[in-house]
């Protein structure tokens, strides 16, 4: 007997803070996944839109990824020495971004963004980091200032434990507000080491960049001699081959990657031209290291994932078409049931906001109906669809979310909406 979700939750709470190892996890203990589905300890099956928070673009337990990871693990799980595999994956990633000459692997997105900022501070000799309200760049101290994701869900965007002196070195501005950025640069441009931004914000729900916003940041940073960092931990190899920067042609100085490049294993990276990247040890004096960095099992899974995407020229078109079908189906269902909701999407990810129009920033995101989301989430869970358990997290699709699965999701939504509308 495996026990129920409730029993596992009780047991977990006795040994793990809140019963979870990362804040926005809840309700179901998972035993296995396959394709677009997960099964919980009660052997109930769900269509999954968490997809390891965007890491699993090929779906759960993709056979080629599993085989590659098994082969790698059988040869030894970690050496603390370089491997041909990590070079091949770095080459493949570099080939996807015209401005990238060097790639350094780390274990998490948090490490990637933390180091990118360290390089920017070293290069410029300046202290200030500019970020945007509702963007999430991992949990390093400098980023827990008006942060998104779990910090936003739990209402602790500025975490206790971050010394004020460190928080003061981060300025957080409203997303999509170029005028606020211009003002900041006008007043304090010579203090700014870096602007870090999610080119598509995915951690306050999905908020798209307004026309000219990213280009404006490119211009401001270039003029002031500070570095522009695109945090593509979510968007990298999800919105298209490479990432948003490649798809749209706006080139940052450094990018951070994670999620998809590890194929569901702990792997992330920061990358950019040699002139910035060669500041890092052992070539340069900026220190960054990791016992398990470039782990061969993670590298094998990531490389196989990227090769699958590269070898199928239609992959991103298919993903885009299915995301659009789901988004348009959702929008139509909300309209038919008289529920004021806006569905925002880009390839492989979408968000439902219970407010009449698509939000442009965190203040507008927060003016959504949180109770409607709660009712919607639970009504869909009952009907076998597992959404991210927060209104501030995007849904992620994989290539395993085929037309039938999209149609089944929409059926569940139509059945659930009377509960939501009637709430
Ligand atoms: N940047 C972005 C844009 C993210 O979405 C996340 C995690 N969701 C991170 C950084 C941090 O990555 P990790 O959780 O691997 O530390």
Image (cartoon, helix red, strand yellow):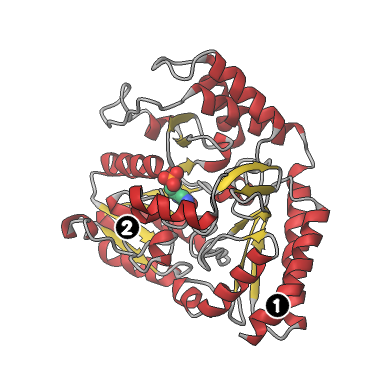
Q: Relative to residue 180, is residue 368 drawn left or right? A: right
Callout 2 touching callout 1 (CB < 8 Å): no
- The spot of residue 6 in percent (x, y) is 50, 58
Mark 2 falls on what kind of element?
loop
Label 2 within 8 A of ligand 1 by Cβ: no
Identify residue for label 1.
417
Q: For the N terminus, which image quadrant?
A: top right
Identify residue for label 2.
144
Q: Earlier in the sequence, mark 2 or mark 1?
A: 2
- The spot of residue 67 in percent (x, y) is 66, 24
- Residue 168's quadrant in the figure? bottom left
Measured in 3D between alpha carbons, the distance from the residue under mark 2 to the one under mark 1, in whole angstroms, is: 35 Å
- The spot of residue 181 in percent (x, y) is 38, 66
The one of 423 and 177 positioned closer to us in this rendering? 423
Q: Relative to residue 128, is residue 173 drawn left or right? A: right
The one of 1 and 376 positioned closer to us in this rendering? 1
- Residue 376's quadrant in the figure? bottom right
For disc 1, the neighbor class at 10 Å (few under 14, some 14 to 19, many from 20) is many
């Amino acid at each position: 007997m495996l026990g129920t979700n409730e029993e596992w939750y009780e047991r977990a709470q006795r040994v793990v803070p809140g019963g979870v190892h990362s804040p926005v996890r809840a309700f179901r203990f998972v035993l296995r996944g396959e394709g677009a589905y997960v099964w919980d300890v009660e052997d109930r099956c769900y269509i999954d839109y968490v997809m390891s928070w965007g890491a699993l673009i090929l779906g759960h337990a993709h056979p080629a990824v599993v085989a590659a990871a098994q082969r790698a693990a059988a040869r030894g799980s970690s050496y603390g020495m370089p491997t041909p595999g990590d070079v091949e994956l770095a080459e493949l990633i570099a080939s996807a971004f015209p401005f990238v000459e060097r790639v350094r692997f780390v274990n998490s997105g948090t490490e990637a963004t933390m180091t990118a900022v360290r390089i920017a501070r070293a290069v410029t000799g300046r202290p200030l980091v500019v970020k945007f309200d509702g963007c999430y760049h991992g949990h390093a101290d400098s980023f827990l200032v008006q942060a998104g994701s779990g910090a936003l869900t739990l209402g602790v965007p500025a975490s206790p434990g971050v010394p004020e002196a460190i928080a003061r070195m981060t300025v957080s501005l409203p997303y999509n507000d170029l005028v606020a950025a211009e003002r900041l640069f006008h007043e304090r441009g010579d203090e700014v080491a870096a602007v870090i931004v999610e080119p598509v914000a995915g951690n306050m729900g999905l908020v798209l960049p307004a026309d000219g916003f990213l280009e404006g940041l490119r211009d401001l940073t270039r003029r002031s001699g500070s570095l522009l960092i695109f945090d593509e931990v979510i968007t990298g190899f999800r919105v298209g081959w490479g990432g948003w920067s490649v798809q749209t042609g706006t080139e940052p100085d450094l990018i951070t990657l994670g999620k998809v490049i590890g194929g569901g294993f702990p792997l992330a990276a920061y990358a950019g031209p040699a002139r910035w990247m060669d500041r890092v040890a052992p070539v340069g004096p900026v220190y960054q290291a990791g016992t398990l960095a470039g782990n061969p099992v993670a590298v094998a899974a990531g490389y196989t994932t990227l090769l699958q995407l590269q070898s199928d020229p239609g992959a991103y078109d298919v993903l885009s078409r299915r995301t659009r079908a789901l988004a348009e189906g959702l929008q139509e269902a909300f309209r038919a049931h008289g529920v004021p909701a806006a569905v925002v999407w880009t390839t492989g990810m979408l968000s439902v906001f219970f407010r009449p129009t698509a939000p442009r920033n965190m203040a507008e995101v927060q003016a959504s109906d949180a109770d409607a989301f709660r009712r919607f989430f639970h009504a869909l869970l009952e009907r076998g669809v597992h959404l991210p358990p927060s209104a501030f997290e995007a849904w992620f699709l994989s290539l395993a979310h085929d037309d039938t699965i999209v149609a089944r999701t929409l059926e569940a939504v139509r059945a659930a909406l009377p509960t939501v509308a009637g709430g």
